[in-house]
Amino acid sequence: MDPRAIAMGLTFAFIWSSAFSSARIIVADASPLFSLAVRFLVSGLLGVMIARAMGQSWRLTRGQWRATILFGICQNALYLGLNFYAMQTVEASVAAIIASTMPLLVALASWLFLGERLRPIGVVGLLAGFTGVALIMSSRISAGIDLFGVALCGIGALALTFATLAVRGATSGGNFMMVVGLQMLIGSAALFVAAPLFETIYVYPTVPLALAFTYTTLFPGLLATLIWVTLLNRIGPIRAATYHFLNPVFGVSIAAILLGERLGPLDGLGVAITTLGILAVQLSRQPMAKPA
């Protein structure tokens, strides 16, 4: 057991899950893609400056550059961009639930396309995880949820899945803070191009917007990403992904407390089933202990 890795995983899961609620606050007073582009610009510049102060180099390996570019486009521009755009009409708890399917999608893709063996408990976990999401979505669809926004969140989850499978090259060779800063700048550049094409840019200065933007920039934007990349390097992507099983619980709970979003009995049951399904999938992907 690695206590430091456990602390890092729990901290990452909580901060990552809180980003959906802070994003919901931001898009109430600012256009989503433009505000996200500015956030990544600030976070990226801070990350690069901190990296240089730490003595880290601009010189990344070819694998790091490839993974950093893919991560910047797939996670920052596509996954977060689509989620920010969707949360104009979709609740933060719904976006968090859809995003939490990423470990299930990673396991499914690894099983179907990469030839990774999945134990029986993993298959059961996949079925349970997607069943839990279906339960939640059924109750929300009957309540009139915006299906276009849900579709955007789903596409974002697929982009995050691809980024997770491609990020391994960014976890070798050190320079973790530099990698974090550069992938944010890449995402920022892509979003600055997309913003005027897909939205009318506006900003209504308010205290909630300032607080949410500052929090999102420093914590989910910078700190959580650094923790995640460091955790990948410390324990590997399979073990690190286990902590995503907490995202449904944290994401829904924070949205209920901070935003007052309603959590019905069917939602609670769906969150519990999804959480257990994700945990089963991740445990099934852990390396089996070798006999002495």
Image (cartoon, grey):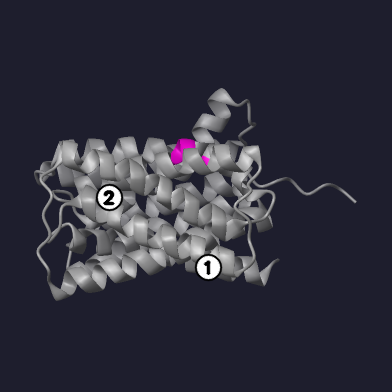
Q: Is residue 289 above or below residue 115?
A: below
Contact flag, marks 2 and 1 (Cβ < 8 Å): no
Q: Looking at the magenta stretch, what is its main secondary structure?
A: helix
- The residue sitting at 47% across, 35% down in the picture is 162
Q: Is residue 218 above or below residue 132?
A: below
Visible residue check, residue 191: yes
**Residue 163 magenta-highlighted:** yes
> Could you tell me how far apart the alpha carbons at marks 2 and 1 are, in whole angstroms?
31 Å
> Which mark, residue 95?
2
Name the amino acid, label 2.
Ala
- The residue sitting at 50% across, 60% down in the picture is 48
Q: Nearer the viewer, residue 265 or 198?
A: 198
Quadrant of the rendering where the N terminus is positioned: bottom right
- The residue sitting at 59% across, 52% down in the picture is 58
Q: Magenta segment range?
A: 160-164
Residue located beneath label 1 in the image:
50
> Which mark, residue 185?
none
Q: Residues within 10 Å of mark 1 (few under 14, many from 20)?
A: some
Say left or right for 178 vs 135: right
Name the amino acid, label 1.
Ile
Q: Nearer the viewer, residue 217 or 112?
A: 217
Where in the figure is residue 264, as x and y percent of width and height? 20, 59
Say left or right for 175 vs 189: right
Where in the figure is residue 150, as x and y percent of width and height? 22, 40
**Residue 121 magenta-highlighted:** no
Q: Nearer the viewer, residue 147 or 170?
A: 170
Q: Residues within 10 Å of mark 2 (few under 14, many from 20)?
A: many
